[in-house]
Amino acid sequence: MRTPPATSGRRPGTASLLATAGGLALFGYYLHEAGVTTVAGNIRSLGWTFALVLVLSGLRFAARASAWRRCLAPGHGLGLRDLLPAHIAGDAVANLTPLSLVAGEPVKVLYLRRRAPLGTTVPALAIETLFYTLSITVVIGAGAVASIVVVQRPASEWLVIGLPLTALLLLAGGTHWLIWRRVRFASTALRRLARRGVMTAFLERAAHRVHDAETRIHHGYPRTGSRVLLVALLETTFHVLAVAEVFLVLSAISGRAPTLVEAFVFETANRIVNVVFKVVPLRIGVDQAGTAWVAALLGFGATTGVTLATVRTARMLVWMAVGMAALVRRGLSPTRLAAGATAPSVVAIMARSPFGARAPKSRLQPAIPAEADRRRLYAAFLADTLATCRTVPDTAVRVAYAPDGGPGGFSRLGIDEAELLAQRGSDLGARERALFEDLFAAGYAKAVIIGSDLPTLPRAHLTQALGRLRPGTVTLGPAADGGYYLIGLTAPAPGGAVPDLFTGVRWGTSAALDDTLRAAARAGFAVERVAAWYDVDDAGGLARLRRDLDPAGKDTPGQATARVLEQLTGTEAVT
């Protein structure tokens, strides 16, 4: 499923500009009719109630972000603190531009591009959006019935409203049934029309794209009743909180106490405005017009309606500011958002916890006898290696921890729990192969694996390794000891497997690289070599490291290592 870039130099069309101008004109008209002074006084009367409005709206964001999380495949490693700011940022862009969802939805996944691949987040977001859309259809239908109850129209009109409501409920249930049963209804219908000679070429292409989208949605759709119910409950919670917000504001600004049913009717009108007038930024003007009409219909008066809509606009502006600040903090400009629309690559560092039961770097014991010093130095190695990896553009970073060391202690180095993966396998080759499988299963298109003892590794070696990766190729970075410090692969084709480049390799010897080259030839893979480098495994590697380090160079790799070695210099720890 391709996600359109958030911005691509595309300008809003004439219709969008006219809608925006018309919305501003409506806003001015209804504000004037309601009385600017009266509306301003009503808003001031909210006081701390506006803070509660912000809390409720924040909980609504959290409900949808939680629903998105429940739609993600297992092992995604994303928490609410990742998904919530992404959702707020996407909503800010959607409300700010006439492009609405075309701009806002991609921002949500691109915001997370360093945390998770698009292949993981996009299908889950599409499923969550589907749940949300179906919930809106039910809300609108139920709201139509509620409006009849409140306004007390003639009983004969129940049929007029009841039939559309029944149709909406059947649509929601039918869509769920089709997806649950993996029925390819849309692509099949398009192909049948194409076979009848109706725009054959166009419909065949459309059917192919729709078929691909259906496949991804079917694959990622929650397959247990409990997960489906949980996502549906979270979407329902979103709407319940929205009704609570309306009820709270009406209670503060209205001359009479509202009922929950009346608040629900107001929120239904708001949902309709949001759906129909998405091209109008902030729904400015049309929200005031629609809410004023509903307020007059329910006996609250147009002024109350305009005030309610204006409070809603003010709330949206606050959260837009939060969302845009999150984008700026993440360093996402429109150009970078557009560039990030491709599936990201990943660099995985195979590491051991510096603070685990087993001390790392035992081969450095002759040079650094004290275990505590070796732990400090290895922690610095890992911190410097990680810092270099984080500078590779549009590339995620994962730390694969050794089973005997466990996941503990990595947070001290600024490594988030979501960035951790467990190594699997009985030897180094099995663990590397399993790590590639886990990374590709997570949706990454390109993956490079390196060690954790490369504190001075230039970033260019990583960018070269990723840049040279093509299907059917493996990138290798030869190490000074005859092995390799880097290996990279592209994701296999659907149904394919990671090539066996790991069987028969004499790990830990000077023959490891040559054995891997022979394995690549057997697998029919071309080899792309990047510049050689060295890892720091023994006293010789440590001596070279000390010569290469530049403690005065603030922008050169290995600064954490340089500081630790400087502290150890002159003591018995370093010879």
Image: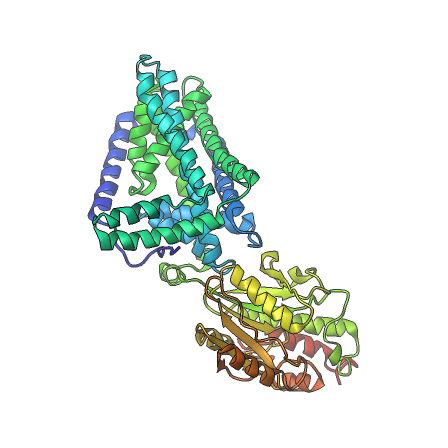
What quarter of the picture does the C terminus occupy? bottom right
- Coordinates of residue 21 in the picture (x, y in percent): 23, 41
Residue 187 image position (x, y, % from top left)? 34, 48
At 53% from the left edge and 60% from the top edge, which residue is drawn? 441
The image shows residue 565, relative to residue 422, as above or below, that is below
- Of 94 and 510, nearer the camera is 510
- Where is the N terminus found, in terms of image quarters? bottom left
Q: Is residue 499 left or right of residue 562?
A: left
Instruction: For residue 38, say whether it is visible.
Output: no
Image location (x, y in percent) of residue 40: 36, 30
45 vs 499, nearest the viewer: 499
Q: On the rendered structure, is 355 left or right of 302?
A: right
Q: Look at 28% across and 47% down and name the residue there.
A: 192
Total labels drawn = 0
In the foreground, 205 or 462: 205
Which residue is rendered at x = 24% and y = 31% of the image?
29
Residue placed most toward the observer, 561 or 60: 60
Within the image, what quadrant is residue 427 found in?
A: bottom right
Work out which residue is located at the far front of the displayed protein and give it.
195
Query: Which picture quadrant has residue 242?
Result: top left
Indicate the position of residue 215 as horizontal and vertical percent values: 42, 51
Q: Quadrant of residue 449?
A: bottom right
Please say if 439 is above or below 384.
Answer: above
Q: How is the image coloured?
A: rainbow
Q: Residue at x 60, y 72 (%)?
A: 384
Q: Is residue 462 visible?
A: yes
